[in-house]
Image (cartoon, grey):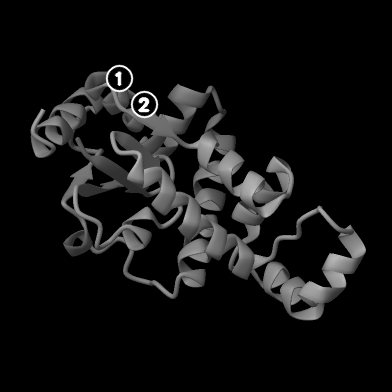
């Protein structure tokens, strides 16, 4: 019984690998469920959470949060409806990730899980990296994107990742010393990576 977090460079195959590991270990792969849980706890729409994840840490998001007070937004949205800024998102994310990890036998992707659950027993942290051309190729092959759109997706995904970790106050998210296992997906296949992870968790 374990919990696995997957941090990855965008396009390194974190979601695909996570789903494959979950199938192999009979774990639950949680991605969209994290968004839904955050939305439910914060009383906002799923699209609000998605939008926050895309902009968290960015200049525009910080500016809006600084200009609009919580009290003002409470009055604007009305009783029973939620409001989300970067601070609320991070607080809620911490609560949700901790609660989901307590359920055990789950795989959590991205969103700073390696920091939120850093001191939790029975949690294994993975880091996936790959050369940029390989990440572009992965997006092209697995998501049927043109080369130009695949490259744009990789670039924008990495910017979002940088912005989110900036909100956590972290810059060393690619330091392999923080993880139980770092895998260069340019050098191993998805199937080989699955076996590595299963060996790590003792399955």
**Label for residue 19?**
2
Give the quarter of the figure containing the N terminus.
top left
Q: Is residue 83 above or below residue 195?
A: below
The residue located at (31%, 26%) in the rendering is 22
Q: Residue 145 appears in which quarter of the rendering?
A: top right
Q: Position of residue 138 (x, y in %)?
A: 40, 31
Give the quarter of the figure containing the C terminus.
top left
Q: Is residue 173 above or below residue 201?
A: below
Q: Residues within 10 Å of mark 2 (few under 14, many from 20)?
A: some
Q: Position of residue 108 (x, y in %)?
A: 38, 42
Q: Is residue 29 above or below residue 98?
A: above
State the count of labels: 2
The residue located at (71%, 61%) in the rendering is 84
Q: Nearer the viewer, residue 108 or 178?
A: 108
Q: Residues within 10 Å of mark 1 (few under 14, many from 20)?
A: few
Q: Nearer the viewer, residue 112 or 84?
A: 84
Q: Is residue 81 above or below residue 56?
A: above
Q: Position of residue 200 (x, y in %)?
A: 11, 39
State how far apart marks 1 and 2 are (Cα): 6 Å
The residue located at (48%, 37%) in the rendering is 31
> Could you tell me which secondary element the residue under label 2 belongs to?
helix
Residue under label 1: 23
Horizontal arrangement in the rendering, residue 18 relative to residue 184 (left or right) = right
Q: Nearer the viewer, residue 139 or 3?
A: 3
Q: Position of residue 46 (x, y in %)?
A: 69, 41
The residue located at (56%, 58%) in the rendering is 92
Horizontal arrangement in the rendering, residue 121 relative to residue 14 (left or right) = left
Q: Are marks 1 and 2 in contact (CB under 8 Å)?
A: yes
């Amino acid at each position: 019984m374990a919990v696995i977090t997957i941090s990855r460079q965008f396009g390194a195959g974190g979601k695909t690998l996570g789903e494959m590991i979950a199938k192999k270990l009979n774990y639950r792969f949680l991605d969209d469920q994290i968004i839904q849980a955050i939305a439910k706890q914060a009383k906002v729409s799923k699209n609000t959470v998605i939008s926050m994840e895309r902009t968290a840490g960015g200049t525009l998001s910080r500016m809006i949060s600084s200009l609009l007070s919580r009290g003002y937004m409470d009055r604007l949205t009305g009783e029973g409806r939620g409001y989300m800024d970067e601070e609320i998102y991070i607080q809620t994310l911490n609560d949700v990730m901790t609660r989901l990890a307590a359920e055990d036998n789950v795989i959590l992707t991205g969103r700073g899980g390696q920091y939120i659950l850093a001191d939790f027993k029975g949690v294994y942290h993975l880091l996936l990296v790959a050369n940029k051309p390989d990440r572009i190729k992965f997006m092209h092959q697995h998501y049927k994107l043109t080369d130009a759109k695949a490259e744009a997706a990789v670039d924008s995904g990495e910017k979002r990742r940088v912005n989110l970790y900036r909100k956590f106050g972290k810059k060393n998210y690619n330091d392999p010393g923080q993880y139980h296992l770092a895998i260069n997906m340019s050098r191993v296949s998805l199937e080989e990576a699955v076996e590595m992870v299963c060996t790590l968790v003792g399955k």
